[in-house]
Amino acid sequence: MPRPPWQGFFVIRAKNTLSQQGHLRTLSFRGTSTLFPEKLQNWTSHTDFRELRSLDLSVRVYRQAFQDLTRMAEDGIFQRLQQFSLLGFKDATGNDADVAFRDLLLALPPLTSFTDTMSVGKEGEPSAGSKAYWSVTLTP
């Protein structure tokens, strides 16, 4: 009988990846930093977002990271998310930003609170979604 294919040095770790991930109810990115795809990938490799209730993106988000968030939402990763805050894009303006913003909102579950604090970008256009600050809070 032939040997099974070699699966690498960390077979046990690979099998228990979900059980070794942290569980958060609230995650907030704040400050002058930006959320780029590599930073999001680092968080997703160490965190199980299925219990996440509140996501605060009070930083500029690169378009690719925003698309990754949309894919995660489409895959049901944010099924328990209730509150979402967004500052805006780092590298998208105008219609591109609006389309990405719309796609994410359509993929998210119904929210009880949404805050959009997107400001005007370099070219004088909104970075996405809205022309001014607005907040919506829904109560059951």
Image (cartoon, helix red, strand yellow):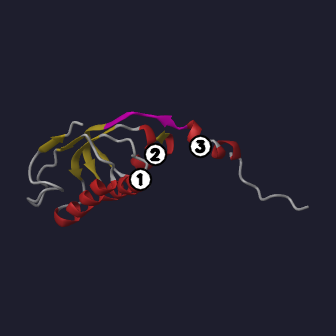
Amino acid type assigned to the residue bearing label 3 in the image? Thr
- The kind of secondary structure element at disc 3 is helix
* Callouts 2 and 1 close, C-beta under 8 Å: yes
Amino acid type assigned to the residue bearing label 2 in the image? Thr
Q: Quadrant of residue 131?
A: bottom left
Amino acid type assigned to the residue bearing label 1 in the image? Met
Q: Which residue is drawn at 13% across and 55% down?
A: 121
User: What's the magenta region?
Assistant: 21-28
* Image x and y of residue 46, in percent: 50, 40
Q: Residue at x 88, y 62 (%)?
A: 2
Q: Name the residue under label 1.
A: 72
53 part of magenta stretch? no
Tell me the distance, in whole angstroms, between the alpha carbons under discs 2 and 1. Answer: 10 Å
The image's mark for residue 17 is 3
In primary-sequence order, the first of circles 2 and 1 is: 2
In primary-sequence order, the first of circles 3 and 1 is: 3
Q: Residue at x 46, y 45 (%)?
A: 44
Quadrant into which the C terminus falls? top left
Q: Quadrant of residue 92?
A: bottom left
* Image x and y of residue 5, in percent: 77, 59
Tell me the distance, in whole angstroms, between the alpha carbons under discs 3 and 1. Answer: 17 Å
The image's mark for residue 81 is none
116 and 50: which one is in front? 50
